[in-house]
Image (cartoon, rainbow, N blue to C red):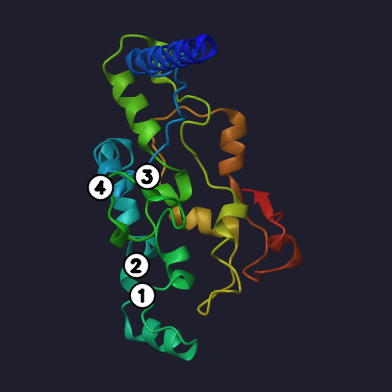
Amino acid sequence: MKATRIGRARWWIAAAVALVGVAVTALAPEGSAAEPAQAKVNKYIGAAKCKNCHASDETGNQHAAWTKMEHAKAYEALASEEAKKFAAERGIADPQKDEKCLKCHTTGFGAPPEAFDKKFDLKLGVQCETCHGPGEAHMKARMAAAMSEDPAKKLLGEGEIVGTPERQLCVTCHNTESPTYKPFCYFKRLEETRHLNPKKERSEAEKKELAKKCGCADKCPTADCAEGKCGVDG
């Protein structure tokens, strides 16, 4: 009998400790030792939100530049008769629903649902964030900077946003797997799609990088071009 009572006492003590633990965890602030905060996902916010800060002619109107690119019409292009013909030849019923097409005609393909802002519109095609990375952290940082008097916050944080996409990113879609592939030169395409902020001060190294031209004499792709080595100083 005594052993049974001791056993029951131990059970109640264990239960009480567990309840206290639950209560402490529930009351603890996010990120405390009681409940480590999970890393926040830097979400895709969509070109419509990028436009809020990137539509001024004075600073380059990057949004308007994007709307004139084929990237902005990439998803829409999948509904064309030409796209449907290519798709049918490859056993694809609807190119606007097939992942083999969507992976290069939309933004953030393959990312989980929680990686997208609730107002993100997939139908806007290859948007800003395909090249520059998810923009939620950048948007929040710039909004905070606008409300701050701290000059340090006016500077872009390291890794906050991708300034210029690297060739390796571009060729994940601009390659021979595409049924409509055309020879692709990274440096030439950068020149054609460039949308810089004219007010931004740039270092000599940045200016030299921007001056690089296609060195393939319109004969892309050469071996050097395929390896991303064809850029020459302008």
Q: Which residue is mark 3?
A: 114
Amino acid at pointer 4: Ala
Secondary structure under the numbered disc 2 in the rendered image: helix
Dot 3: within a 10 Å radius of its alpha carbon, few (fewer than 14), some, or many (20 or more) residues?
A: few
Horizontally, residue 14 falls left or right of residue 203, namely left
Q: Position of residue 17 (x, y in %)?
A: 44, 12
- Which mark, by number, is residue 75? 2
Amino acid at pointer 2: Tyr
Q: Considering only order in the chain, which callout, 4 or 2, is on the residue closer to the N terminus?
A: 4
Residue 67 in which image quadrant: bottom left
Q: Considering only order in the chain, which callout, 4 or 1, is on the residue closer to the N terminus?
A: 4
Dot 4: within a 10 Å radius of its alpha carbon, few (fewer than 14), some, or many (20 or more) residues?
A: some
In space, the residues marked 2 and 4 are separated at their CA atoms by: 16 Å
Amino acid at pointer 3: Glu
Residue at (65% x, 66% y) in the render? 217
Towards the viewer: 139 or 117:
117
Residue at (24% x, 47% y) in the render? 119
Q: Are marks 4 and 3 in contact (CB under 8 Å)?
A: no
Horizontally, residue 51 falls left or right of residue 2, namely left
Q: Considering only order in the chain, which callout, 3 or 2, is on the residue closer to the N terminus?
A: 2
Dot 1: within a 10 Å radius of its alpha carbon, few (fewer than 14), some, or many (20 or more) residues?
A: many
Q: Considering only order in the chain, which callout, 3 or 4, is on the residue closer to the N terminus?
A: 4
Residue at (59% x, 61% y) in the render? 171
Q: Which residue is mark 4?
A: 48
Secondary structure under the numbered disc 3 in the rendered image: helix
Q: Position of residue 225 (x, y in %)?
A: 69, 61
- Which mark, by number, is residue 78? 1
Q: Are marks 1 and 2 in contact (CB under 8 Å)?
A: yes
In space, the residues marked 4 and 3 are separated at their CA atoms by: 18 Å
Residue 146 in which image quadrant: top left
Towards the viewer: 233 or 92:
92
